[in-house]
Image (cartoon, rainbow, N blue to C red):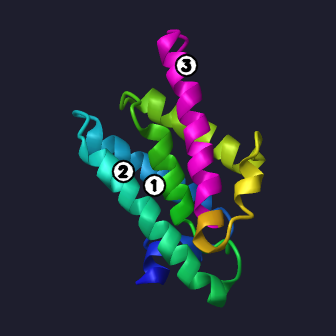
């Protein structure tokens, strides 16, 4: 079960680029599920993905090593966080995807420090924080009517 969760239902087995694919699949699924209206279940789903991700990433670490490229559930959780409280339109979902991947790859503003946390926490929290940064930036853009 932990390998299925950690790999984002197998996406992580694709190798290089798996994190980007997992985030993109999450963004498309979010749009398809919630474009017709925001559902409070998104909070529960985001929390469950994050908690299961911490657990599963920690469980597969002894077999695959610290923050294996196969583990992409962290990108799914980070993408979900970046989309919370954001209007579900193609433009905003695409912007959330680009911003999340930027923060996840570049890791500015102390994001890299979270990777040093033990087990699944270090794997998951850098992406969750990247999602928070992307969300905050989008919220500012929305409030200032810049996008």
Asked if labels 1 and 2 touch by Cβ distance under 8 angstroms, the answer is yes
Separation (CA) of disc 1 from disc 3:
25 Å
**What mark, if any, has residue 25 been given in the picture?**
1
Residue at image location 39% in from the left, 52% down from the top: 46
Task: Reply above or below: 50 against 71.
Answer: above
State which quarter of the image contains the N terminus: bottom left
**Between disc 2 and disc 3, whose residue precedes?**
2
- The image shows a total of numbered marks equal to 3
Disc 2 from disc 1: Cα separation: 6 Å
Q: Pick whichever, 113 or 90, lies toward us.
A: 113
Disc on res. 45: none
- Tag 3's secondary structure? helix
Question: What is the secondary structure assignment of the residue under circle 2?
Answer: helix
State the residue at coordinates (69%, 41%).
102
Which residue is identified by label 3?
140
Percent position (x, y) of residue 88? 36, 32
In this view, the residue farthest toward the front is 118
Numbered circle sitting on residue 29: 2
Q: Secondary structure at mark 1?
A: helix
Q: Main secondary structure of the magenta part?
A: helix
Spot occupied by residue 24 in the image (x, y as percentages of width and height)? 51, 51
Check residue 130 for magenta coloring. Answer: yes
Region rendered in magenta: 123-147
Q: Position of residue 116 (x, y in %)?
A: 75, 64
Q: Residue 123 at x, y = what percent?
A: 63, 65
Q: Nearer the viewer, mark 2 or mark 3?
A: 3
Q: Residues within 10 Å of mark 3 (few under 14, many from 20)?
A: few
Q: Label 2, label 3: how many angstroms apart (C-alpha)? A: 24 Å
Residue at 36% across / 46% down in the picture?
30
């Amino acid at each position: 079960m932990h390998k299925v969760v950690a790999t984002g239902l197998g996406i992580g087995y694709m190798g290089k680029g798996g994190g980007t694919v997992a985030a993109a699949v999450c963004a498309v699924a979010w749009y398809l599920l919630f474009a017709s209206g925001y559902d409070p279940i998104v909070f529960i789903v985001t929390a469950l993905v994050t908690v299961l991700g911490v657990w599963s990433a920690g469980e597969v670490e002894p077999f695959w090593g610290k923050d294996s490229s196969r583990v992409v559930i962290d990108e799914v959780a980070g993408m979900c966080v970046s989309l919370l409280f954001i209007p579900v339109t193609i433009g905003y979902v695409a912007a959330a995807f680009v911003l999340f991947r930027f923060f996840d790859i570049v890791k500015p503003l102390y994001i890299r420090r979270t990777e040093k946390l033990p087990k699944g926490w270090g794997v998951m929290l850098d992406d969750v924080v990247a999602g928070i940064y992307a969300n905050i930036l989008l919220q500012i853009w929305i409030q200032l009517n810049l996008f």
